[in-house]
């Protein structure tokens, strides 16, 4: 077996270094997951965080192919682990309904898309469905109270070094792989407001993706039981890195998420959240004009909603006004893969609407009104489950449940500025959705060891 794997890896390396690395990492993930569920899921989240940088490093060795296997590796890895989870967990009727309705909503646009651009449609379908499959992983984490959230544990450890790496990208010369990616990328918004600087992206693919993950990590961190000073010291690099992405929509989403968290958590957790927000606001006001970097950040934030200065908002509104009537008039949509990143990866020479800075409009445009309503039903059914789970959570678990609800709401706010359901933000959303639906279906009891609420939903889906 080992000889066969080595021979296969060698054959792939001759054809493409990217294919060899992708195949090896996928086999490694499968082997780790067979040995340990928690280690396998942790490896999956690490793949999502680091594979984009691995792609950039491998691209220095050999030119990137038109269809880079490493670009789809995290999606395939997520689907693989979700299938393994599905064998070990029996979802209840509501969970199966949410999955089926959301999947049908995404796939309605596939037939039309295949007639327009099969490559773009295939990639988009893979991305959306793999993200949706994370629902099963979230369900599995909730069904095992001793495991906890594997996503939260990985982000708690990984985001601090990623934030420091992002800060270094802004203040120091870029590494060879990052500089090569910036030179070759088609992202038009990579330049920072301050001259000769970039909007940081750390190990991720874009400033927006990095900003969303930082926001998720910040909400999770606020919910943890730490002293105020310790929490602030930990959060400071994350907040600085978030500021250096210059993604205004991420800040808006984070503020909404923190407000939801403070309202849902109540008590001391809510007070800590308000205190952290006030400290950050005071810092922005005091330092806002003290140097070019902080001034660029405050100018960027204060331009949000300004009709004269907010060029991106005007462009987004113009795109919406142009595409909304067209989307409503196409029952089956323009075809999956005809909006966003997938359209940019078209191999047929025809591209859809690449710059569509509204995730809701992206889904509506690609798959049509009926499909859009189906996906939105699944989304809001998941949020409703998070609300229900919060309402029945004991005091010890309320802070964590409030954080899950706040992140779901935060991602839905961010969806208005980008297709959050596509890529790692979508994986995070559907993972937390599965976790919430499983929590709503379980019977909370008190753990005799920790005093924290655990649920009595067994991996088979039955309540003992």
Image (cartoon, rainbow, N blue to C red):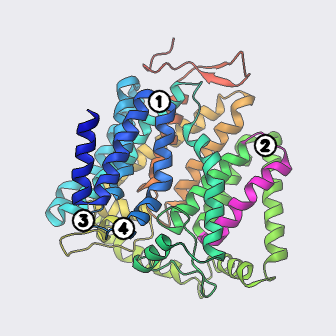
Q: Determine the CA span between mark 4 and mark 2.
A: 49 Å
CB under 8 Å between callouts 3 and 1?
no
> What secondary structure is marked by label 1?
helix
Callout 4: SS: helix
Determine the CA span between mark 1 and mark 2: 31 Å
Residue that appears at 25% across and 50% down? 10
Which of the labelled discs sits on residue 368, or is there none? none
Q: What is the residue that sits farthest to the left in this orientation? A: 115
Above or below, 193 relative to 92: below
**Label located before the other in sequence (3 or 2):** 2
Earlier-in-chain disc, 3 versus 1: 1
Question: Main SS type for the magenta part?
Answer: helix
Indicate which disc residue 269 carries: 2
In the image: residue 446, left or right of residue 326: right
Quarter assignment of residue 391: top right
Magenta-tinted stretch: 224-248
Q: What residue sits right under mark 3 in the picture?
A: 334
Badge 1 is on which residue?
37
């Amino acid at each position: 077996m080992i000889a066969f794997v080595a021979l296969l890896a060698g054959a792939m390396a001759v054809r493409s270094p990217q294919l060899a690395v992708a195949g090896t990492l996928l086999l490694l993930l499968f082997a780790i997951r067979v040995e340990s569920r928690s280690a396998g899921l942790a490896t999956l989240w690490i793949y999502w965080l680091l594979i984009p940088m691995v792609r950039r490093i491998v691209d220095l060795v050999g030119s990137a192919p038109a269809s880079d296997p490493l670009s789809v590796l995290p999606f395939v890895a997520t689907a693989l682990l979700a299938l393994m989870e599905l064998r070990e967990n029996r979802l209840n009727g509501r969970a199966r309904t949410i999955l089926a309705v959301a999947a049908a909503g995404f796939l309605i646009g596939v037939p039309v898309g295949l007639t327009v651009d099969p490559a773009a449609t295939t990639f988009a379908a893979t991305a959306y469905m793999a993200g949706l499959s994370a629902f099963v992983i979230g369900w599995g984490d909730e069904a095992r109270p001793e495991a906890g959230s594997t996503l939260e544990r990985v982000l708690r450890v990984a985001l601090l070094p990623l934030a420091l790496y992002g800060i270094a990208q802004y203040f120091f010369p870029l590494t060879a792989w990052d500089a090569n990616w910036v030179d070759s990328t088609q992202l038009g918004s990579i330049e920072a407001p301050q001259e000769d600087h970039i909007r940081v992206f750390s190990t991720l693919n874009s400033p927006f993706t990095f900003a969303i993950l930082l926001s998720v990590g910040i909400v999770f961190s606020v919910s943890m039981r730490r002293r105020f000073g310790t929490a602030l010291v930990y959060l400071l690099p994350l907040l600085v890195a978030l500021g250096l992405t210059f993604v205004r929509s991420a800040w808006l989403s984070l503020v909404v998420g923190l407000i939801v968290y403070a309202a849902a958590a109540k008590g001391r957790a809510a007070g800590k959240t308000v205190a952290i927000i006030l400290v950050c606001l005071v810092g922005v006001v005091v330092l806002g004009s003290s140097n070019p970097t902080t001034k660029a950040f405050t100018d960027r934030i204060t331009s949000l909603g300004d009709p004269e200065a907010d060029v991106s908002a005007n462009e987004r509104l113009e795109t919406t006004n142009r595409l909304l009537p067209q989307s409503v008039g196409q029952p089956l949509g323009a075809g999956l893969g005809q909006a966003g990143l997938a359209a940019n990866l078209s191999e047929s020479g025809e591209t859809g609407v690449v710059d569509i800075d509204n995730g809701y409009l992206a889904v509506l445009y690609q798959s049509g009104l009926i499909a859009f309503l189906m996906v939105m039903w699944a989304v809001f059914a998941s949020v409703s489950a998070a609300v229900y789970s919060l309402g029945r959570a004991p005091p010890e678990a309320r802070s964590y449940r409030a954080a899950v609800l706040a992140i779901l709401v935060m991602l839905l706010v961010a969806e208005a500025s980008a297709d959050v359901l596509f890529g790692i933000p979508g994986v995070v959303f559907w993972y937390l959705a599965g976790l919430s639906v499983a929590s709503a279906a379980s019977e909370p009891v008190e753990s005799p060891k920790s005093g924290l609420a655990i649920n009595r939903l067994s991996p088979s889906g039955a309540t003992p």
